[in-house]
Image (tube, rainbow, N blue to C red):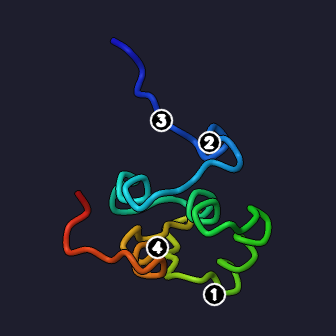
Amino acid sequence: MAPDVKVEPSSVATGEVWTVERVKALGVMTNVETAAQVLGIGRTVAYRLAKEGRFPVQVLRIGHSYRVPVLRLLELLGAESDRLD
């Protein structure tokens, strides 16, 4: 049985272009680090903004983790959609 493969934010090359399709492919939620990459925000600043409640889009605190609804990212980018194909 092969282990589940999970793409962590650190495995995404810096400077890669985030297209609307690529953001939609993240699913329903993503982590703060990935959302920060999409928005061009550094990791440290992103976590500080999330903690202070000032991240550019809605952030949900679930246990010790922060999660960002992908729909909110798409809305901020002007690419809202009724479907996340």
Q: Are marks 3 and 1 in contact (CB under 8 Å)?
A: no
Residue 6 placement, left or right of 21: right
Q: Identify the amino acid type marked 2.
A: Val
Pick whichever of labels 4 and 1 is earlier in the sequence: 1
Above or below, 80 against 41 in this view is below
Residue at the (46%, 73%) spot, across then down: 73
Pick whichever of labels 1 and 2 is earlier in the sequence: 2
SS of the residue at dot 4? helix
Count of labels shown?
4
Q: Are marks 4 and 1 in contact (CB under 8 Å)?
A: no
Depth check: give the residue in front, 32 or 85: 85
Query: Which of labels 2 and 3 is toward the front?
Result: 2
Residue at the (62%, 42%) spot, across then down: 12
Q: Position of residue 42 (x, y in %)?
A: 76, 64
Identify the residue under disc 4: 73
Q: Identify the amino acid type marked 1.
A: Gly
Q: Position of residue 64 (x, y in %)?
A: 59, 63
Query: Which of labels 4 and 1 is toward the front?
Result: 4
Image quadrant where one finds the N terminus: top left
Residue situated furthest top in the rendering:
1
Q: Within the image, what quadrant is residue 84 found in?
A: bottom left
Identify the residue under disc 1: 53
Q: Identify the amino acid type marked 3.
A: Lys
Q: CA distance from mark 4 to mark 3?
A: 21 Å
Depth check: give the residue in front, 15 or 55: 15
Identify the residue under disc 2: 12
Above or below, 26 against 11 in this view is below
Above or below, 56 against 23 in this view is below
